[in-house]
Amino acid sequence: MKDKLTIIKVGGKIVEEQDSLERLLADFSKIEGFKLLVHGGGRSATKMASDLGISTTMIDGRRVTDDAMLKVVTMVYAGLVNKNIVARLQGLGVDAVGLTGADMDIIRSHKRPAGAVDYGWVGDVDRVNGDALASLLRSGIVPVIAPLTHDGNGHLLNTNADTMAGETARGLAGHFDVRLVYCFEKAGVLRDENDESTVIASIDNAAFETLKADGTVSGGMIPKIENALKAVADGVCEVVITRASSLDDLGKGTHIKL
């Protein structure tokens, strides 16, 4: 029987506001067994870019990453946000280490080809080094992964944090019984985005297609659920989409199933 591993993905204002981050990390520190955290930080990157006089271009919710923006996201994701999380976890007694995909060659990607849109230095994941991450975890280290990967040829690549969490879960499914939790500001996937009581308890492939077609699921929630469905199809035991404040009760939220 494999050991259990909980992977938490968190982003948005949760990691960028002190109160919500402190609560999340306090709850994360109490999770029993092996654990790993993947974070975003896009709003902080946008603010930093603005402070530096660098314009931000978003297309379908994705950041266009030119040379200047790559420098910004590297500073913010791998530096400011990542090390703030690591320091706070150390303060809670969690022996954490901050990583990008380039560190230990844990996540390698290729630059997304330019099509109708050229996203610049954006990476699509090719592989996750599950052996290296499993070795770290089993040595008692808690990885905190920033949304940057590399191409093996010396280039960093801005990579969607939801995708990185899903691919990391898939890459570790051979080593652990993996539970992947996407944390955000809502109670789960909602039938009515203005009514927190309308959480959809479970979603499978067929339900997902229906929810997309009728517009219940749209925008950034679509790739989140796509990543979740891909993860469970490839051996991840459970995927939950829930409010960050519900880490102590993962029976809540939306559960993604085959």
Image (spheres, rainbow, N blue to C red):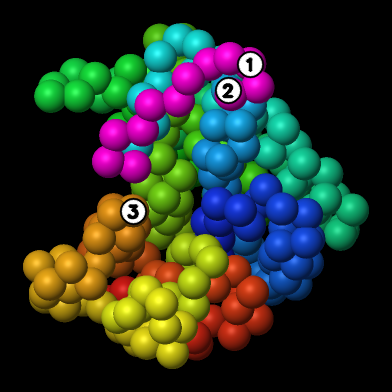
| Up/down of 165 relative to 68, above or below | below
Quarter of the figure with residue 254: bottom left
Identify which amino acid the numbered label 3 is placed on: Gly
Can you identify the residue that label 3 sits on? Answer: 220
Residue 89 at x, y = what percent?
A: 80, 53
- Please state the extent of the stretch shown in magenta in the rendering: 50-61
Query: Residue 154: within the magenta?
Result: no
Q: Residue at x 43, y 89 (%)?
A: 197
Crowd band around label 3 with a 10 angstrom C-alpha radius: few (<14), some (14–19), many (20+) = few
- Which disc number belongs to residue 211? none
| Up/down of 198 relative to 153, above or below | below
Can you identify the residue that label 1 sits on? Answer: 52
Can you identify the residue that label 2 sits on? Answer: 49
Q: Residue at x 13, y 22 (%)?
A: 115
Query: Residue 51: within the magenta?
Result: yes
Identify which amino acid the numbered label 1 is placed on: Leu
First reached walking from the N terminus: tag 3 or tag 1 = 1
Secondary structure, magenta segment, majority class = loop
Residue 1, visible in the rendered structure: no
First reached walking from the N terminus: tag 2 or tag 3 = 2
Identify which amino acid the numbered label 2 is placed on: Ala
Of 105 and 175, nearer the camera is 105
Q: Nearer the viewer, mark 2 or mark 3?
A: 2
Q: Seen in the image, is 181 located left or right of residue 21? A: left
- Could you give the CA–CA distance between mark 2 and mark 1, rounded to whole angstroms? 5 Å
Q: Seen in the image, is 92 located left or right of residue 19? A: right
Crowd band around label 2 with a 10 angstrom C-alpha radius: few (<14), some (14–19), many (20+) = some
| Circles 2, 1 touching at the beta carbon (< 8 Å) | yes
